């Protein structure tokens, strides 16, 4: 079982890293939010994998639903976060007429 | 009587001494105030007047009440017979010392050197006090009229007072070192007073010349004083006399310095000590300052250079008389003889009224030294006193003449007898006294000198006849040049009509002292040995000290049998003849003009040149000592500039260089450290600042990287 679980971990890790990479390297704010979504969904994948193939699943209760429940919560959170983030992007556009995230760099020296 | 039995004389003496000092301080401190500017003479006159009164009181008590014990032994009023040397070397004269009454002050006490200031009063001191204060008082009075209108009127009186203080200190002190101090102080006052009119050309030069010449003599004096202190271990005259007496009686010995005998040591010390009076009393060859000193105001000439300061030398010789060995006394006699003769010859040819009087003073001082040298202690000192009075009278009279005609040149005077009657009469009286005309005071003192000179020179040693010969011959010269002076000033036709017309007799403040001094010149105290002062003649009053040094030197003076009245009578006859000779010369030259003065000059042309050029003394000194002095001054100045100043500048430069080094160190090292700190933090901060890019994604990348790092650490390290 752990072998199968491990594969899910890899995928989850890959998604996480790709998400990181996207956040760090994209200039467009929307793409950065996409990266954030990737990261969140990677975490959700991990949760679901543990729910289906983890130790609790092997127990008497069979497939645990906690992981799946948590994944739904993560989606809700992602949506809320996206809404807030888009609000920030709108503010960003109002201030600088651009959504390039390298533009607001005035906190430097 | 009881006057000298307690400390009262000391109080009197202190008052006499300190009053003029107070007058000096008063005038010196307040000379700008309105009172002193208008009446600067009042306080000085009061102080010197009181000092005079106290001096007269002391003299009265000393002369009338105290007698030298030796006098008690003789029956009549004749001079006591000298006893054999071994009999008594004790000093039996009257002497009051303030030390006996607890009045002495320790001036210096360093263990090795102890100097006590005390006052000693004996007949010599008492008489000198009267002479000094009397002449000083009369000069003060005279100066009120003479210096009237002078812009520095009150300062003149201040200096007169300072001089009086110094001179009185010199007279009263018992201590050789303090005598020297007052001696120098008197010289300083002379310097001030000669150079009083320092705006003119002559006075400053003359005052420096006077001071320098006196200093020259004072070097010898000081060496003598130091020798004495080394020999006797003390500076007190009474102690020195006591120790010398012990040596003379064979009870003690002087330390043998340099391996010399006692007699030699005493002789050397005596000669050194005599150098001081040689300069101060203008003996040849240190007489050159006295004629130039006439550049000062005439009252100064009268007080200092006729009556008192130059007399200080003679007084000092009298004080230390017991100290002089026969060799020294002989030297003194020779010096005095030469001075008397040389000065008298120079006085024959001068045309300046004050200079003639100056040379006359010089000559008379030579007489005094001559007298002291040949053993005429009382004669020399008595001549000092009579000379003080008539010479002061002459100088003040000359000042009166100068005041009237505003010149000192005899060639511009003449016929002033009618215009200045009081001056003329007093001047004439003083001239007769100076010449030694019988019945005048100068006669007795001069004849006494001649007596002693004859007694000293008696014998077959021709060289010892010189003092007597010079004393006699000098009398003729003296009388002649004084008559010449009187004639050229007061008789004949006036040679400058303008001056003659404006001449007028001097005010009362100037003529009163003249009259007093003339009276003192007539009133010959003790012409014949008639006891006047309660049984003592003047010679007895001024009895000599025991001849201690002569005994040590192995030549005790032989007993002079009293020559009775034979010798004085002989001397009287001789002196009258001499005066007649002088008068006849004068009569022929000036009155009858047969031949006249010009012809006489031509007769004696080479002598006349020598006299008028003052025997070329000044030129000689200029060529030798003065040039040497100037060269030495130049060398020392060069040394001062190049060596000493260079050293001082070098120290400054070294300090500056050191400062520079320290400054560099401060700048480079200390400041560098501080700056390094700053640079370092700046660099570090610059480096660290680059983390803050302001770029959001960079921050995210750092965060993720850090998180990865921590995860790896947890995985591999725990």
Image: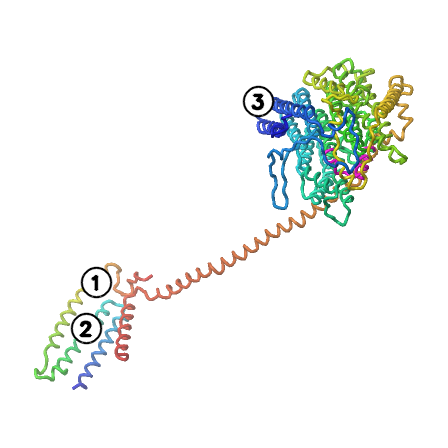
Q: Earlier in the sequence, mark 1 or mark 2?
A: 2
Give neighbour class at mark 3: few <14, some 14-19, many 20+ (Cα, 10 Å): few
Quarter of the N terminus of chain A within the rendering: bottom left
Give the structural element (helix, strand or loop) at label 2.
helix
Viewed as shown, does residue A42 lie left or right of B259? left
* Mark-to-mark CA distance, 1 and 2: 19 Å
Residue B35 badge: 3
What residue sits right under mark 2 in the picture? A40
Colouring = rainbow
> In this picture, which residue range is highlighted in magenta?
B318-337
Name the image quarter holding residue B232. top right
- Viewer-side label of 1, 2: 2
What residue sits right under mark 1 in the picture? A88
Measured from the top left, where is residue B433 in percent x and y?
A: 79, 21
Viewed as shown, does residue B640 lie left or right of B354? left
Q: How many numbered discs sit on the rendered protein?
A: 3
Name the image quarter holding residue B320. top right
Judging depth in this view, the residue of B372 and B343 nearest the camera is B372
Give the structural element (helix, strand or loop) at label 3.
helix
Measured from the top left, where is residue B72 in percent x and y?
A: 73, 27
Chain of the residue under the numbered disc 3 shown in the image:
B
Marks 1 & 2 on one chain: yes
Measured from the top left, where is residue B389 in percent x and y?
A: 74, 23
Magenta segment, prevailing SS (helix, strand or loop): helix
- Viewer-side label of 2, 3: 3
- Viewer-side label of 1, 3: 3
């Amino acid at each position: 079982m752990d072998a199968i679980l491990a594969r899910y971990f890899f995928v989850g890790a890959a998604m996480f890293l790709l998400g990181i990479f996207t956040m760090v390297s994209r200039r467009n704010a929307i793409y950065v939010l996409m990266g954030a979504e990737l990261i969140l969904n990677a975490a959700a994948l991990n949760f679901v994998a543990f729910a289906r193939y983890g130790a609790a699943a092997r127990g008497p209760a069979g497939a645990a639903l906690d992981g799946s429940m948590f994944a739904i919560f993560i989606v809700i959170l992602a949506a809320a976060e996206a809404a807030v983030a888009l609000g920030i992007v709108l503010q960003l556009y109002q201030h600088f007429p651009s959504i390039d995230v390298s533009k607001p760099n005035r906190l430097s020296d | 009587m009881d006057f000298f039995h307690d400390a009262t004389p000391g109080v009197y003496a202190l008052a006499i001494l300190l009053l003029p000092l107070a007058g000096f301080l008063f005038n010196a401190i307040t000379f700008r105030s309105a009172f002193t500017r208008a009446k600067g003479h009042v306080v000085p006159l009061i102080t010197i007047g009181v000092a005079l009164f106290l001096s007269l009181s002391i003299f009265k008590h000393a002369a009338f009440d105290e007698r030298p014990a030796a006098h008690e032994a003789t029956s009549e009023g004749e001079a006591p017979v000298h006893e054999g040397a071994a009999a008594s070397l004790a000093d039996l004269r009257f002497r009051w010392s303030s030390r006996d009454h607890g009045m002495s002050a320790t001036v210096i006490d360093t263990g090795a050197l102890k100097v006590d200031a005390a006052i000693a009063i004996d007949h010599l001191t008492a008489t000198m006090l009267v002479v000094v204060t009397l002449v000083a008082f009369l000069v003060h009075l005279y100066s009120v009229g003479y210096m009237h209108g002078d812009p520095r009127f009150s300062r003149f009186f201040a200096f007169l007072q300072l001089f009086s203080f110094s001179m009185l200190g010199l007279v009263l002190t018992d201590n050789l070192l303090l005598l020297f101090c007052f001696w120098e102080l008197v010289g300083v006052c002379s310097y001030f007073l000669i150079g009083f009119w320092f705006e003119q050309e002559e006075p400053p030069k003359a005052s420096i010349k006077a001071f320098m010449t006196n200093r020259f003599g004072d070097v010898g004096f000081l060496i003598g004083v130091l020798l004495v202190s080394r020999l006797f271990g003390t500076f007190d005259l009474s102690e020195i006399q006591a120790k010398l007496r012990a040596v003379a009686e064979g009870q003690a010995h002087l330390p043998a310095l340099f391996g010399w005998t006692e007699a030699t040591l005493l002789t050397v010390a005596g000669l050194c000590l005599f150098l001081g009076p040689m300069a101060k009393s203008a003996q040849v060859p240190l007489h050159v300052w006295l004629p130039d000193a006439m550049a000062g105001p005439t009252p100064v000439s009268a007080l200092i250079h006729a009556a008192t300061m130059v007399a200080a030398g003679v007084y000092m010789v009298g004080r230390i008389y017991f100290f002089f060995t026969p060799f020294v006394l002989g030297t003194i006699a020779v010096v005095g003889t030469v001075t008397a003769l040389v000065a008298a010859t120079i006085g024959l040819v001068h045309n300046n009224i004050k200079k003639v009087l100056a040379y006359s003073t010089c000559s008379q001082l030579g007489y005094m030294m001559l007298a002291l040298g040949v053993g005429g202690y009382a004669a020399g000192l008595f001549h000092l006193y009579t000379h003080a009075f008539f010479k002061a009278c002459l100088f003040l009279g000359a000042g009166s003449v100068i005041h009237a005609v505003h010149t000192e040149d005899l060639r511009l005077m003449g016929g002033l007898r009618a215009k200045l009657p009081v001056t003329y009469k007093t001047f004439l009286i003083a001239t007769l006294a100076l010449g030694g005309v019988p019945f005048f005071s100068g006669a007795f003192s001069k004849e006494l000198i001649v007596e002693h000179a004859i007694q000293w020179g008696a014998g077959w040693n021709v060289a010892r006849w010189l003092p007597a010969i010079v004393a006699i011959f000098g009398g003729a010269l003296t009388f002649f040049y004084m008559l010449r002076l009187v004639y050229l000033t007061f008789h004949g036709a006036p040679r400058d009509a303008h001056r003659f017309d404006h001449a007028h007799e001097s005010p009362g403040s100037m003529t009163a002292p003249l009259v007093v001094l003339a009276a003192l010149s007539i009133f010959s105290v003790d012409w014949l040995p008639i006891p006047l002062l309660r049984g003592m003649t003047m010679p007895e009053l001024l009895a000599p000290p025991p001849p201690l040094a002569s005994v040590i030197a192995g030549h005790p003076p032989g007993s002079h049998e009293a020559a009775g009245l034979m010798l004085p009578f002989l001397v009287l006859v001789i002196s009258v003849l001499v005066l007649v000779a002088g008068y006849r010369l004068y009569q022929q030259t000036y009155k009858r003009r047969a031949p006249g003065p010009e012809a006489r000059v031509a007769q004696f042309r080479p002598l006349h040149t020598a006299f008028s050029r003052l025997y070329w003394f000044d030129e000689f000194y200029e060529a030798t000592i003065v040039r040497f002095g100037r060269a030495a001054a130049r060398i020392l100045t060069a040394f001062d500039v190049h060596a000493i100043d260079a050293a001082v500048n070098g120290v400054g430069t070294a300090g500056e260089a050191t400062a520079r080094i320290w400054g560099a160190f401060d700048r480079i090292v200390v400041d560098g450290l501080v700056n390094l700190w700053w640079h370092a933090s700046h660099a570090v901060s610059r480096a660290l600042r680059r983390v803050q890019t302001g770029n959001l994604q960079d921050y995210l990348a750092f965060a993720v990287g850090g998180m990865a790092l921590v995860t790896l650490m947890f995985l591999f390290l725990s």
